[in-house]
Image: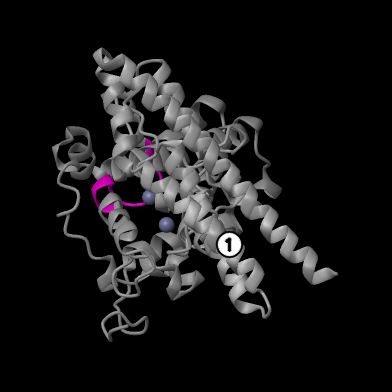
Amino acid sequence: MTDNNNQTRAPINWTASIMFILTTLVVAIGVPWYGFAHGYNSAAVISMIVLVYFTGTAITAGYHRLWSHNSYEAHPLLRLWFALWGAAALQNTILDWCSGHRVHHRHCDDLEKDPYSAKRGFWFSHMGWMIRDYPSSRVDFSNVKNLQKDPIVMWQYKYYGQIALGMNFGVPIALGLVFGDVWGMLLLAGFMRLFITHHVTFFINSLAHMWGTQPYTDENTARDNHFLAFFTHGEGYHNFHHIFQNDYRNGIKWYHWDPTKWIIKGASLVGLASNLRTVPDFKIRRAMVKMQFKRAQAKLAKAEGTEKWSELLEKEYDRFHQMLNEWTDQHVEKLGETRKQLQEKWEKAAVRQRYRELEEQLHQQSDRLKEIMADYRASLAS
Ligand SMILES: [Zn+2]
Ligand SMILES: [Zn+2]
């Protein structure tokens, strides 16, 4: 870490600090006090919950999966919705957010370059990176040139202050006037909602890089965590996301809690989203089997008298590589191409058939590895 990047030297970002202190104080003191003194009507409670989802998913489906990763294309109406509710989240403009996030992916965990490197600790990656002006947080927009062509992104950038104020105060006040309790609505649907949305998003940078499993890669700190996914609108499948960042899904199984994915899919069904990008299953399975090998090898390397098992593993590893050599990424790309070029029907059918076979082989490979390691454990016990 350079001196400039040192926590004690970086100057305090007063705008962010005052905002965090103010919202925390209101939530810690104002919200309970008003509840005891006056009580909240159900409209305020329901509005808070609904707006938590509007604000949170504008960040996850809009700022994150649409604008940072181009994982799909969205109709201008949907982009406007995300720009408005994204501003309500008070996490800076689309341009600033996405520029920082693209740096996070490019230099994940780097102490100097990752703006919210989890290697600098929980507090730093959660909030610390925002309350001081660290050099690692400085963005120059050179990595968001494509977004600068989006008129909605640029409109939000230009009027961010006004939009953010309108969404955070104007909307709750208007709702309060309709439902007859302006202060109650302002406290719950305004401050409490903002506080929840803030920390939910911040957990993705802190906890989702510390707590959970690494089924796809251990080359960065990102983790998969079902529990976190529930609170982060699906972003808790962060290990998958860091290796396959352009996939519109983070939770890939049907039972994975990923409302952001469902919103995008739903939007595509009514014509508000298109070109949803997904990674071929083959690549996902390949990453998982690679990790299985890596773990098994590490485990055997640590123990003694494991020659027999290491040999078995090595044989399997050769088989795995042979299989992969037969089926390179180009073949997978070709599958995509042939999908478009229907005249090559026979080729497409053949490629598809081979692809299915290969997926099946990968499944079997994974099962064999599990068996070998189970046998190994049993041999230790006996
Ligand atoms: Zn991350
Ligand atoms: Zn991302």
Q: Is residue 217 placed above or below 85 in the rendered structure?
A: below
Q: In the picture provided, is 155 more to the left or to the right than 51?
A: left
Which residue appears at 41% of the width and 25% of the height? 352
- Quadrant hosting residue 171: top left
Q: Is residue 293 placed above or below 194 in the rendered structure?
A: below
Which residue appears at 17% of the width and 42% of the height? 146
* Image color mode: one colour
Which residues lie in the magenta part?
A: 85-96
Give percent across and percent down for residue 45: 62, 36
Q: Quadrant of the N terminus?
A: bottom left
Residue behind mark 1: 313
Q: Is residue 273 magenta?
A: no
Total number of numbered discs in the rendering? 1
In this view, which residue lies farthest toward the right?
382
Q: Toward the viewer: 380 or 19?
A: 380
Q: Is residue 90 magenta?
A: yes
